Image: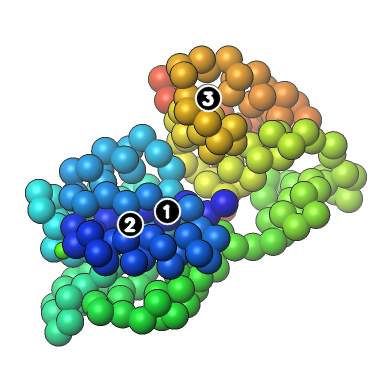
Amino acid sequence: MIRVLIVEDEKPIAELVRISLSGAGYRCTCVYDGLAAADLIERENFDLILLDVMLPGVDGFELMEYIRPLGIPVIFLTARGAVNDRVRGLKAGADDYLVKPFEIIELLARVETVLRRYHKLDRVLEIGGLTIDVSSRTVSRAGEEIALTKKEFELLLLFARNPGIALYRETIYERVWESDYMGDSRTVDLHVQRLRKKVGWEQKLRAVYKIGYRLEVDA
Ligand code: CA
């Protein structure tokens, strides 16, 4: 499932966006200030961030400097008429912007366009020598299908959709097992080890000290 972080201090807007995106099948989390957003981005993994410009504490532009190195796509939410904000947002590395108030249909279209650009919605991914078909949930290498368990497939997909990003064990656990991480890293470690062997990613799925794992593939 695609995870979207909504950073917006106007709660009715945040809630409207959350309901609309949830209805379209996205998994959404809302935060209402910049610091809480930074904390969450550090701990969890998101596929897209909707970022309000004017926020209490750390504002959207400051937060953008922090997000940019992580490679997570960002759509800025700007106030009507604030042309400078839009220009500044795009210059800061945002992928798009929406002017408030916006139509839900426009929001959904922009979100989909940005996710497509980042291959987040691709049904077939070619990565690290593998062909991953999300619809049929099959994986193959050079035409040879590789049998994976359900969890192994989810794990593979998580790495494939976030190449180059160090994923925390906690994040991995919560996204693949869809329950709260209780601090036991063995489940994740064991599954990563098995996955590595099965798909031949011994050199690609690297342990990141004190964090978790990162998929290293050539662009
Ligand atoms: Ca605001």
Closer-to-camera residue (26/215): 26
Q: Which residue is mark 3?
A: 207
Name the kind of residue labelled 1 in the image: Cys
Which structural element holds mark 1?
Answer: strand
Ranked by sequence position, the earlier of labels 3 and 2 is: 2
Kindly report which numbered mark, 3 or 2, lies closer to the viewer in this rendering.
2
Residue 109 in percent (x, y) is at 47, 77
The answer to whether 190 is drawn above or below residue 88 in the figure is above
The answer to whether 138 is drawn above or below residue 109 in the figure is above
* Ligand 1 occupies quarter: bottom left
Numbered tag placed on residue 6 in the rendering: 2
Mark 1–mark 3 distance (CA, rounded to whole Å): 28 Å
Q: Which residue is mark 1?
A: 28
Some atom of ligand 1 lies within 8 Å of the CB belonging to the residue at label 2: no
Q: Residue furthest bottom?
A: 81
Mark 3–mark 2 distance (CA, rounded to whole Å): 30 Å
In this picture, residue 146 sits left or right of residue 216: right
Kindly report which numbered mark, 1 or 3, lies closer to the viewer in this rendering.
1
Name the kind of residue labelled 2 in the image: Ile
Q: Residue drawn 64% across and 26% down?
A: 192
Mark 1 is surrounded, within 10 Å at the Cα level, by few (under 14), some (14 to 19) or many (20 or more) other residues, namely some
Which structural element holds mark 2?
Answer: strand
